[in-house]
Amino acid sequence: MKKVSSLFFGFFFLILFLPKAEGITVKTYVDKKKVPLNDKLLYKVEISDTGVYKVPDPEIQAIPGFTIAGRSTSSNYYFMNPEVSISNVYSYTLLPQQKGKFTIPTVSLVIDNKTYSSQPIQVEVTDPVQASPPQSPTPRRRSLFNQLDDLFKDRGSLFPREKRKIGKDDLFVRMEVDKNQVVVNEQVLLTFSFYRAIPIWGNPTFLPPTPTGFWTENIPLSGSQKDFVQVLNGRRYNVSVIKSAIFPVSAGSILINSAQLQVQIDLFPDSLELTTKPILLEVMELPVRGKPSGFNGLVGRYSMNLEVDKNETTSDQPITTTVTVSGEGNIKAIPNPVKPKLTPFDSFEPEISETIEKTPNGLKGFKKFKYVLIPRKEGKLEIPPFQLSFFDPDKGRYETIQTKPVSVEVAKGEEGDQAISSSSSKRNFIQRLRSDILFIKPNQEFLTDQGRQIYQNPIFYLLLVVPVILLLVAIFILRQQHRLSTDIGYARGQRAARLAKQRLAEAKEILKEGQSTDFYALLDIVLREYFADKWNIPAPSLTNEIIELKLIETNGTMSEDLIGLLENCAYARFALSGHTETEMLESFKKAADAIVQLDKK
Amino acid sequence: MRYSSKHRWRLVIRPLWIVLVCLFLFSDSSFGSDRATAFYNQGNEKYGMGKFKEALDLYKQVDRSNAYLFFNTGNTYLKLGQLGYAIVYYLRAERLRPRDHEITSNLEFARLLKVDKEIKNAVSMLNQILDSTFRFFSLRELFQIGIILYLMVFGCAFWFLLDTSTKRKSTAALVGAFILFIFICHGTVTGFKMHDDLFIHHAVINTTEVNAMAAPDRTAEILFSFHEGTEVVVTRSEKDWSLVKLATGWTGWVPTDSFETV
């Protein structure tokens, strides 16, 4: 009684908080459904969200099959923005008396003149469980854990002596879809729930399913949508939910494979793996019958409207037309609505923006298409309706929606070139809009033909080839000159015949004058210089013997004649008596022939 | 004595070159009759009076390729409401005079009148640079520049050969190499432009609306439809049908008489 009255006083303090009569719930649960005969069962009654109302004591007197060994109360404060809710938990420790199946009866409470009842709970009492032998090999030594265990004996083990088996009911996962039969692109809500009735260590690792052939959008959840408490089959579970909206891309029987959760219990290093059953989804093709011509694969429920930023404008000012498509479904997949014939306007590609809201019931939002329209003429112009077709899976048929036609008044704009900028568009739409094209080109004195291409002109090829030829010629000439200036023997050799001929010509003149000594002197020089040049030997060192040898080398037959001639010349030079013209002529001829002959080589 | 031969050809060849080069670079045409000029001028008069049909008939009788003629013909087609032909003629004019602002301006205007709006594809920086170099010169001008560069390279070669000083020789070699490099770059651009002008068949649709089919057959599936003034590239032609490609990359078969090649 004392405890109850203190609770009473506690409640008066809670008057500060807002009362919520409707929120009151009464939940009852146990910590296990199957209890061994020599174990104890914890039974709790939770009354939540009472606000300021007086909460009576459940006053549980007797429960068939059990004796009530102890009871305690506690208050839990739940912080859920912006309110605080308080729940009171009455705990009873029950000791089973005999084996069998028993029902813990309902608990009824009257709060604020209303009766609240709980559900009855079925429990089963099983055979007593043997206490397992102590872990350490020396039974005498009591480990720290065991000592601590004795300390906490009454409160229930902190570190259980026997390794508690994790029952199927203690932890499980569930994966569900909101519908099993859908059409292509229809939204499916995939919900993964993790139920736990026993405490776990740390954060579990979630491996989501990876179904192929879906467009997936994760739905972020918060607060009570994400984590809440649920009583199921007489047990109290903490539930965590992960939700996503998936859209199948193609038709067929598609399997959503298992999701996995890896959980750590207590201090055991191994983690427990919980998997969901895979889900088979039947995805059907969109019906062919009734498919409108402008249909582009959009599935969901939508509406569309059109707005203009002004109803009156001038012929050089643009109008921004915004078509908004809003609704539920895969907002990203909304295609451009079918544009009507906008012939009285110049129109451009629209600027598209989308806003997507991810709610626990799926995706919804809107997509805006901003068209900039520039009127091409004056007067009352009409923007015809825009159309959009989609398939409504709930109604099971195609729908085509339209915007209402809008009229705009276009007055005469200013004349001349004007720079127009579209203020609402991010892109640079500065256009010089004239009302007409520029005038034609002027008359010509002579209309040239610009069509003939250069490569059809033969001079082109000439100009290509000529420099190459000239370059080759130049290279050759330069090489020649270079050789002449560096290679003396070569130079002399080239020069020999030419010089000889020049000198012969001179000799001829002397011959005519009848100067025999001079003539023979010159002839001698001619021949010697010629040989010297030809064979690249310095003239003074050229003896008759060398000449003879060389001549035999090059031309056997001539050597004797030429040596004779040379000796003749030598004599004749210093001879006192003159020679006749015929004699001189003969010598001349011999010399000339010899040179010609030798030069041939 | 030694340089006499060299001097000789230098004196002869140089002026000959200059004459040849000038003659052929700056001569635009063979001198034909003046009838064509008369037709052109008369056509202009008819246009000025607003008699566009007669102007067009006169312009079409001029058997010459001339930028001004094409431009005026384009204007006339536009006045007569034939957008497709107008764009073709503007494009032809632009090929001959790429930097003419009036031609570019009217072409832009005509393109705005199309029913289908142009989609500007994102183009890379390199493509943009190539594109503007492309468009800046006409093919003829590119060739003219090419010839000049070519001759300059040879000029440097001769300079290199004939100059006695080694320092000037190396300068000659350097300058020559540099000009050669520019020549090669230039050659590449010219090559591209030649390819585009001669081998890529640009065309413009001249019927109000045309359907692109999956196969050259009237009963084949319609892939998409588009309108007069759209610029296409003709990739194949088989009698009555041709396979065209749009700027967006879409291809389809259209009747050959639904477009006019630039």
Image (cartoon, coloured by chain):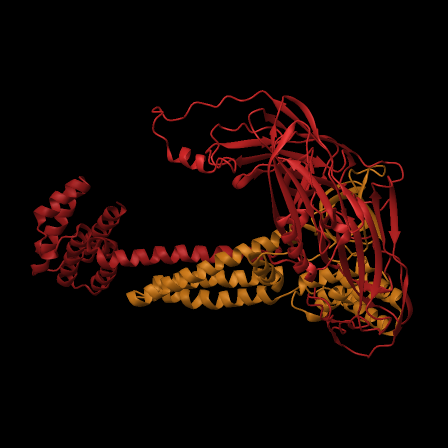
Residue A400 vs B77, above or below: the answer is above
- Quarter of the view holding residue A102: top right
Residue A111 place in picture, x, y as percent: 76, 49
| Residue sitting farthest toward the right | A380
Colour orange, chain: B
Instruction: Give the residue drawn at x 40%, y 64%.
Output: B175
Image position of A76 (left or right of B167): right
Residue B34 place in picture, x, y as percent: 76, 68
Residue B41 vs A173, above or below: the answer is below
Relative to the observer, which residue lies in front, A94 or A577?
A94
Quadrant location, the C terminus of chain A: top left
Instruction: Give the residue drawn at x 73%, y 65%.
Output: B108
The colour applied to the residues of chain A in this rendering is red
Residue B54 vs A551, above or below: the answer is below
Relative to the observer, which residue lies in front, B45 or A84?
A84
Image position of B261 (left or right of A545): right
Q: Is any part of residue B83 visible from this angle?
A: yes
